[in-house]
Image (tube, grey):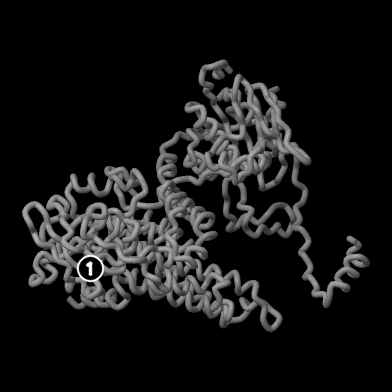
Amino acid sequence: MNFELTEDQIALRDAARTFAREVIVPVAAKYDRTGEFPYDVISKGFELGLMNLCIPAELGGLGLSKIDQTLVIEELAAGCVGIATSMGANDLALLPILIGGSPEQKERFVRPFTEKLRFASFCLTEPGAGSDVAGMSTTAVRDGDHYVLNGSKMWITNGGVADQYTVFATVDKSKGHKGITCFVVEGRPEGLTVGAPEDKLGQRASNTVALTFENVRVPVENRIGEEGEGWRIAMTTLDFSRPMTAMFAVGVGRAAMEHAIAYAKERKQFGQPIANFQAIQFMIADMATELHAARLLTLEAAALVDAGKKSTLVSSHAKRFAADTAMKVCTDAVQIFGGYGYSKEYPVEKLFRDAKLIQIYEGTSQIQRMVIARELLR
Amino acid sequence: MGRIAHGAVEEIVKILCGVKRVEDPDQKIKVNPDGSWIVLDGINYKPNPYDEIAVEEALRIKEKQGAGEVVVVSIGGDDSVTEMRHAMAMGADRGILVKVDGRVDSDAAARLLAKVVEREKPDLVILGRQAVDSDQAQTGQLLAEYLGWGQATFAAKFESLESDEEKAKQPGLQVQDGKVRVIREIDGGLEVVDVQLPAVVTTELRLNHPRYASLPGIMKAKKKPVEELTPAELGVDTTPKVKVRKLSAPPERKAGIMVPDVTTLVEKLRNEAKVL
């Protein structure tokens, strides 16, 4: 077992770190305040190859390992996890195609993302089907050489800026998860309505919308895998993407810890820096230990994916623990800042709001525990 | 040199840039108790920022010409390859490491570079005006002297670094008709000089904003060649002519005081600080 990063990994990480520090951080508060979509930051990130990290070399991508990808993600998330979420959303939308698509579909739906900046959205969650994925009610009915999609999707990251949607719908609701099928919807076809951006608590720079499908016609050749394969494709996608989401959490937690350390050394009470007090020291020590543990769990999950091994259990460990750790670290960072921590003048209240979402999206902390228990009790 | 084609013909330029591995200045630097050097434990390193500007300028000249070669040279240990890889990730074509253990003074660095220049025969050498570690600002000038070449130090740009020219990544150095036109930053203004090529130019901070290394650039950089040379191979004795006797940290700033009103402030500025 070797915990050392390679020279290349250090270079990739440092490139992402520099970008986060010099390009993301200076505007993170602005985009949090306005909720505007950070096109300028994202297009710079795209030019530097910091998006579409999952695309393999044979499709024009960088061919990065999952470990490489998580290293980049941590740095972007330490800059602003809302911006990182929008930068990472293409990967979530393209993974189902990489997992279940034919070579022709990969050429058609994945390669173009390496050529110019575009957005794709992963559309799984519905107003009535969040954690209960199999309870989805968006339908796909075969009509000649097309499917006709009807239904609604909710909390769709980048849905308002995307021009390609990876949509999960059921071809037969009576079959439960065995009816779920994956489709690629191109452009903005007739019948697809994009809702207004959600006004969110945190991660406000990321675009989140509801989508409505009303008799949207999708050619059969846009079906990824067979009918009923959608469930497996979606679950495999989430196994692969959970290390990324876990690293979002590590990044935002690390940013909060760094702010807390700097502030504790500067802030004086009772005639000395508050960093001299054990109450503060213990909070900082716990932050560091738990973030380190979260990072190592995440890297193990990424290593399993890289090795082609089943990663479900460790991916869920990583996502659950990292998300809960980020929330705790950010809560303690606000505590260390005291009243200033509660003010928008200081950076940690944003991180506190941003961290909360990571316990919710891509499988809540509770769902992760269910996955973990199911793996252990089977 | 023979590489510069005059008149209407596109000028193809080979540019050599120095890239020095330096202690990251954005960290707390401590001096050893005996004052012999700084504490190196746990220190982070980065490419000298002035050298990044030199590499950026070389890349822009190459991009504008549509041809040419940018070669980076580093003098130091094996770790210096990291900083050269950064320059190659920005776009430099290849690297040369002159492997030296221990410190090299500006004069030895200039003599080593002169030998590398003799082998490589570049049309233009662009160096940082100084390295941010020991701030000597001598190597470029010494190199030009050893080579018998013209030189222009403190190269800057007319346009602001926030201007559209800068955003369009236009070079500040104009290579034309066997000369390089350099805008030099001097006291109270700018000076324009034309220097016959081959020449040595050193960069000021206000020449360009260096580009970021892209991920594809990083992946390509690891396949670019790095040649290793030694001072012995170059026939240079690197025994320092200048010895650092002692380093000391600047005195700690004393805490400020609060004054009750403007009258007291003016009184203190006049009578105690004697600045009014």
Task: Say if B184 sits above or below A97 in the image.
Answer: above
The quarter of the picture where residue A168 lies is: bottom left
Q: Bin the neighbour count of mark 1 within 10 Å (Cα to Cα): few under 14, some 14-19, many 20 and up.
A: many
Please state if B247 lies on the left or on the right of A350 as rendered: right
Task: Say if B85 sits above or below A81 in the image.
Answer: above
| Residue appearing at x 19%, y 63% in the figure | A214
Please state if A192 lies on the left or on the right of A296 as rendered: left
Percent position of residue A371, x then y? 24, 74
> Mark 1 falls on what kind of element?
strand
Percent position of residue A86, x then y? 38, 60
In this view of the protein, which residue sits in the foreground, A8 or A197? Answer: A197
> Residue most toward the left?
A144
Q: Quadrant of the N terminus of chain A?
A: bottom left
| Chain under numbered label 1 | A
| Residue appearing at x 48%, y 65% in the figure | A34
> Residue most toward the right?
B271
Please state if A256 lies on the left or on the right of A190 as rendered: right
Q: Which residue lies under the disc numbered 1?
A: A152
Percent position of residue A121, x then y? 29, 59
In this view of the protein, which residue sits in the foreground, B145 or B261? Answer: B261
> Residue most toward the front?
A190
